[in-house]
Amino acid sequence: MFPLIILYLILTIIRPQEYMAAFTGIPILPVVLISAFLCWLISSAKTFAAPQFVILPVFLLILMVSVVVNGWFGGALDQLEKFGPIMIAFFVLAASCNTQRRVVITMAVFVLCSVVLVAHGIQQARDGVGWTGVPISEDGRIQYVGIFNDPNDLGLLFASTLPMAVYLSGSRGFLMRLFWLACAAMLFYGTYLTNSRGALLAVLVVAGVYVWYKRGFVTAGTLGVVGLACMKLMSSRMQELDPDEESAFGRVDAWYSGLHMFLSHPVFGVGAGNFTEYNDLTAHNSFVLVLAETGFVGYMLWLAFVGYSFWMMLTVIRFKPEGLEDPARAKAWQSEQRMALTLLLSLCGLFASAFFLSRSYTVVMYLIAAMVVGYYVSARKRFPGLRLFTATDSLGRWFTASVGSIAGFFVLVAILLHVSA
């Protein structure tokens, strides 16, 4: 099961089936995923010991319902075909990441595959076209094939995997540390080549959260201001980071439209995939997209799915197990906290980027979440004192968080529209 889902991860990111003639016409990605799923069905390693295993199937059901209540009955099958494989990949990878070693291997695969995409981008920047045959974009931003054809998607991937590369640089041996540090440097350079403002801000968020954890809020805030100033000098598009700038105003206008879609269809939204039926531009915000398309019901489920992932990693970081006077146990716990911090930083990079992109239903997001969930379930086996989360123990919390975040979006959009007026 684990080798198959790792192969699926490699094919999902590097995507040779989309540009190599040898794979043309062969449904290699579905075949690998189905094979991994069949292994999961008969495996004793499969688990449902986290609320995400309940939330995700219910969220898929809401996706299907959202299009049916908006008059497209065939859309339910369409959503099943689109999001069903993502849900399966989540279940299989989460079950497979049942040891620290497997989590490390998955991180390494994420990083190495991302570095391949950076190398492709470097070739594009140098020669104007990469080995896939995809040229550099008209505005000089690197891109790849398939789901990474948008430079912003590349930036999201690089920002999410950068903390993993830094974590792996703690490996034993000078050459291995040097190798993973070189990978981290390439991922940062790749983020720069995407010229994605969201991705550059995500890198800044990742660094800020790490410094906050290590040195406190004041130091993190100070370095954040310096980092933002440096990034504005590095990136031409960061210099245009202003509500009056055309691209930024288009995003704010899309958020405004999304919020009004929610007001007109508050329960199940306008239907999954229907945002652009009501607005020329997509939402440019993963949270607004879910809210507009699936209404309050879908938004609360999706927010809970995301929130539990963050909560789990924070739980590991803050937890103080018994028996730390034993050096071996203390060392083991330090290893757990270091891994949890890395995954938390990856989540920060992922969702900081997703805040400026409509990527609510993309597979990369759920594969990273699967690694987080799989790690936490396995950590509870090693340290049973860690909290057991269930899908029903925090319904009031997620209802409140949903209402509060929706109100926050209305206030934020009102302020941005007022500033740009």
Image (cartoon, grey):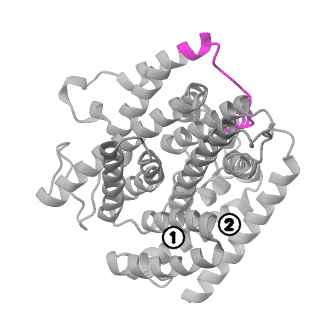
Residue occupying the point 45% across, 33% down:
105
For marks 1 and 2, the one nearer the N-term is 1
For mark 2, what is the residue? 260
Instruction: Give the amino acid at mark 2.
Output: His
Q: Would you say residue 272 is visible in this rendering?
A: yes
Q: Is residue 129 left or right of residue 10?
A: left
The range drawn in magenta is 38-59
Residue in the foreground of this view, choosing between 32 and 277? 32
Residue occupying the point 63% across, 45% down:
334
Q: Position of residue 68 (x, y in %)?
A: 67, 38
Q: Position of residue 83 (x, y in %)?
A: 56, 35
Q: Disc 1, disc 2: CB below 8 Å?
A: no
Q: Is residue 319 left or right of residue 244?
A: right
Check disc 1: other Cα within 10 Å, few if <14, some if 14-19, many if 20+: many
Classify 51 as above or below 355: above
Residue in the foreground of this view, choosing between 265 and 84? 84
Residue in the foreground of this view, choosing between 227 and 77? 227
Magenta stretch encompasses residue 348: no
Q: Which of the numbered marks, if any, corresponds to residue 251?
A: 1
Check disc 2: other Cα within 10 Å, few if <14, some if 14-19, many if 20+: some
